Amino acid sequence: MASITTRRVDLPSPGPGQVAPWLDCRVAGPEDAPLLVFLHGFPEAAFAWDELLAHFGEHYRCVAPNLRGYPGSHSPPEVKDYRAQLIGADVLALIQALGAPAAALIAHDWGGAIAWGLAAMAPQMMQRLVILNAPHPALFMNALRHDPEQQAASDYINLLRQPGIETRLQADDFAGMWSFFERFGGATWLTPGLRDHYRQAWSAGLSGPLNYYRASPLHPPTAPTDPVMHITLPEAMLHVNIPTTVIWGEADAALPPSLLDGLEAYVPHLHVTRLPQATHWLVHEEPAAVIHALQAALNRTDA
């Protein structure tokens, strides 16, 4: 197993007079090896990938950043600074700084939401895309508009968008945060050591992670005038033409496997690996199966 260290990567300033962002990263593997970049979701952080970093760091240069707003990374205060295109720009700058293209971009949950757009808009920056339980934006938007079951499953998003929700989530040793693991599949995997990692990450502040939800138009509609009912996603950001593997825990209570229906229309070079017993937390629940599926994706030449 490869050892894991931390490294801050400074990124170029987005413009004159603007603060240059940076990302705090967990890294493993030789610097001259092919690059794998891992993007975490909510309410996690880069440490969620540690088992995969240690495994794949034997043969790859593995880098898992704490995304914008997460511990140790650039955390601007305004909601507008957490739009998907800005978070994506951080990731592209990171890949460029590390030596593009990446052999694969591997992403879960919110990291996956960002990765879908990057693979469509900047395919030259990665050779493969691997998605873990993160719906394609067009399919997710359609489900939020028209599927009552998905609207109910995603109602937590509207809760997380509320002003001041941070105080409620932090109360009683982050009781409101631990409940997300139970709600979306259970937490038998949540060891005392992992709990300490989560407490440390959440203690650094919740506003950055929550601003991802506040800045996004994709949430269950609360009125016919909600933007999700009327926005049009540009075609250029919907079609992914690089080899793509989706690894899906089918027992995910928030993101059911029905969100995969119709994915082939947007992703022609697609391979889907289904884990019937895994939930949203598949990386923790079935790490061996995820590692096996990821290795297969890296070996695959067609998709």
Image (tube, helix red, strand yellow):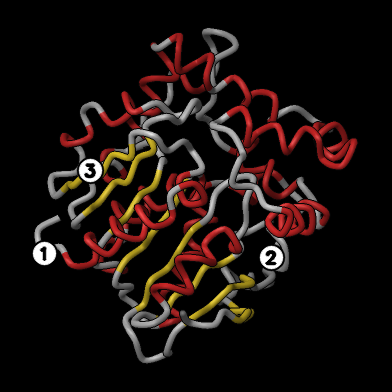
Residue tagged 1: 301
Question: Helix, strand or loop at disc 1?
Answer: loop
Q: Residue furthest left?
A: 302
In the image, 303: left or right of 167?
left
- The tag on residue 74 is 2
Percent position of residue 95, x then y: 42, 73
Going from the N terminus, do you reach mark 3 or mark 2 first? 2
Q: Nearer the viewer, residue 73 or 60?
A: 60
Graded by Cα atoms within 10 Å as few (under 14), some (14 to 19) or many (20 or more), the crowding at tag 3 reads some
In the image, 146: left or right of 159?
left
Q: Is residue 147 above or below residue 181?
A: above
Question: Helix, strand or loop at disc 3?
Answer: strand
- How far apart are the alpha carbons under marks 3 and 1? 15 Å
Is residue 126 visible in the rendered structure shown here? yes
Residue tagged 3: 272
Residue type, label 2? His
In the image, 226: left or right of 99?
right
Residue at left offset 24%, top offset 26%: 261
Q: Quadrant of residue 255?
A: top left
Q: Is residue 290 above or below residue 237?
A: below
Residue at left offset 49%, top offset 46%: 285
Question: Helix, strand or loop at disc 2?
Answer: loop
